[in-house]
Image: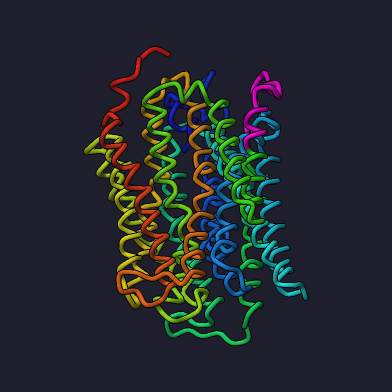
């Protein structure tokens, strides 16, 4: 969510094309340039979505490398766990003069990691080392891409007037998801060797996966180049970095939370639980000023519960083998295509509904759609199962409407800090990805079946979908019972 966009006052240019004093000081041509660059960088991110949206593709690759469900969920788990790190990057480099180099660094790191991932697949390495690279790519993407998005919003916030940003937003988030559909169809062609009536030869494993990661690397390199071309007006006085004491608890929480995930992987579950609880306490302490406000506390709990749905697509992809009796990788491209195509349609509809209702309705609608995706996944058979990924993609818009609710509940003086807090709410939800993988593995290993399901592996995945749905339903119930429909009417109007 873009706090600069929301809090700006609607600057107006003077007749000679330069912003008035106190407003955006750039010329109209420079502002147009920034808007085009913003749309270009966002579009390249969407085009690379099959590998940057960590989950489906990485789970397919881990499955091919012989990983169990727990291990196949780790790339996505680490991706979401690392989404807290961009807040530290923003603290470490708060200077406006560093904005472009920060953006270039984020995209360059992502491009380098994608190239290294492709190389790791084509050089002779043990499968467990390759799995480690997949997990590392998930972690690096969880750091670099959210940070890039935050810096990108700052660049457009500082480099354009709010009244002129409609073009940039239309290009970025209208055409952008369509590029994600194109990228997903391309990944389908690479991974399965066919798409509709098209076929390609000569790309068996591992060249198919290597080609997919390698294709995204130059897209990120191009994004790094475009980021270097922004025109960013510098303030008269630079921001001063806050003392480390302001973020020490956050640092400790990130470190302890990451270690807890490693302990889960190493089968030290009890110690992992303890460290995860400690990480949670550190995060709560760091954001105690926000969580002391009742509406924001409940909204945060609701958001984390529903965000658990973001960690289930790895299991959904792995379940493809049971439903369609084929390798998950052969359908990963179609799954991502449906995911983004439904998101485009739902984005327009939900935005219109929001104008007619209230902020809480956005949470409830997207939460219910997320739950519907899990129910569809449990009961659908054959090719109809793939529709679950489309429904899931529409439900992912909870990532827009949960922040929008917290924004509505925030005092003007709290907006920047509260929205930084919102971007980190994926981190507490990250361990649920490991949980879902562990559930499916446990049921498979103990050969448990029920409700007429003959395969324990299939039942394990269905059970993980049911647990995921139950967590989200709990969040929805809390929202209905405890959250006001219009939180802005309940908060004080003072700054």
Prevailing secondary structure of the magenta residues: loop
Pick the front one: 111 or 86: 86
Pick the front one: 151 or 121: 121
Does residue 174 belong to the magenta stretch?
no
Q: Residue furthest right?
A: 124
Question: On the rendered structure, is 276 left or right of 120?
Answer: left
Please report the residue visible at 61 percent of the width from the left and 69 percent of the height from the top: 67
Q: Is residue 225 visible?
A: no
Pick the front one: 113 or 154: 113
Q: Is residue 235 above or below residue 113?
A: above
Q: Is residue 253 above or below residue 287?
A: below
Please report the residue visible at 51 percent of the width from the left and 65 percent of the height from the top: 441
Q: Residue furthest left?
A: 356
The C terminus lies in which quarter of the figure? Answer: top left
Which quadrant would residue 138 be assigned to in this image?
A: bottom right
Residue 489: x, y in percent? 28, 22
Q: Is residue 71 visible?
A: yes
Q: Which residues are magenta?
A: 231-253
Colour treatment of the image: rainbow
Q: Is residue 1 above or below residue 416?
A: below
Please report the residue visible at 42 percent of the width from the left and 33 percent of the height from the top: 163
Residue 449: x, y in percent? 38, 71
Question: On the rendered structure, is 21 left or right of 307?
Answer: right
Does residue 247 belong to the magenta stretch?
yes
Residue 375: x, y in percent? 31, 61
Please report the residue visible at 55 percent of the width from the left and 48 percent of the height from the top: 80
Residue 161: x, y in percent? 48, 31
Question: On the rendered structure, is 379 left or right of 176?
Answer: left
Which quadrant would residue 377 be assigned to in this image?
A: bottom left
């Amino acid at each position: 969510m873009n706090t600069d966009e929301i809090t700006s006052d609607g600057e107006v240019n003077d007749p000679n094309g330069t912003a008035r004093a106190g407003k955006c000081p750039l010329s109209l041509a420079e502002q147009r340039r920034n808007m085009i660059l913003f749309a270009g960088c966002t579009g390249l991110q969407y085009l690379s979505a099959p590998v940057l949206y960590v989950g489906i593709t990485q789970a397919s690759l881990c499955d091919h490398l012989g990983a169990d469900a727990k291990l196949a969920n780790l790339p996505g788990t680490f991706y979401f766990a690392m989404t807290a790190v961009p807040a530290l990057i923003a603290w470490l480099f708060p200077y406006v003069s560093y904005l472009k180099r920060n953006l270039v660094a984020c995209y360059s790191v992502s491009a380098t990691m994608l190239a290294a991932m492709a190389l790791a697949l084509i050089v002779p390495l043990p499968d467990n080392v390759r799995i480690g690279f997949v997990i590392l790519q998930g972690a690096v993407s969880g750091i670099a891409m959210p940070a890039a998005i935050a810096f990108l919003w700052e660049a457009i916030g500082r480099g354009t007037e709010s009244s002129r940003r409609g073009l940039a937003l239309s290009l970025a988030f209208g055409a952008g998801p369509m590029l994600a559909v194109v990228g997903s169809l391309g990944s389908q062609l690479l991974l399965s060797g066919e798409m509709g009536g098209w076929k390609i030869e000569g790309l068996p494993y591992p060249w198919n996966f290597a080609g997919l990661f390698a294709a995204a690397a130059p897209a990120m390199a191009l994004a790094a180049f475009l980021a270097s071309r922004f025109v960013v007006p510098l303030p008269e006085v630079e921001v001063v970095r806050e003392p480390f004491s302001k973020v020490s608890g956050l640092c400790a929480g990130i470190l302890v939370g990451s270690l807890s995930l490693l302990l889960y992987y190493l089968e030290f579950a009890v110690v992992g639980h303890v460290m995860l609880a400690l990480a949670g306490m550190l995060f709560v302490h760091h954001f105690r000023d926000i969580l002391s406000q009742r509406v924001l506390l409940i909204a945060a709990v609701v958001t984390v519960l529903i965000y658990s749905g973001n960690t289930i697509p790895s299991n959904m992809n792995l379940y493809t083998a049971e439903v369609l009796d084929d390798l998950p990788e052969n359908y990963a491209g179609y799954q991502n295509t449906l995911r983004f195509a439904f998101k485009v349609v739902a984005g327009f509809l939900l935005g219109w509904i929001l104008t007619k209702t209230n902020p809480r309705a956005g949470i409830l609608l997207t939460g219910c759609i997320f739950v519907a995706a899990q129910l569809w996944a449990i009961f659908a058979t054959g090719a109809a199962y793939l529709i679950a990924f489309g429904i899931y993609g529409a439900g992912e818009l909870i990532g827009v409407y949960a922040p929008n609710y917290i924004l509505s509940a925030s005092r003007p003086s709290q907006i920047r800090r509260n929205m930084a807090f919102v971007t980190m709410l994926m981190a507490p939800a990250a361990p649920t990805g490991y949980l879902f993988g562990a559930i499916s593995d446990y049921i498979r290993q103990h050969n448990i079946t029920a409700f007429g399901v003959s395969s324990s592996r299939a039942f394990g995945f269905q059970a993980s979908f049911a647990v995921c749905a139950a967590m989200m339903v709990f969040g929805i119930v809390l929202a209905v019972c405890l959250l006001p429909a219009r939180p802005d009417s309940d908060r004080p109007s003072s700054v």
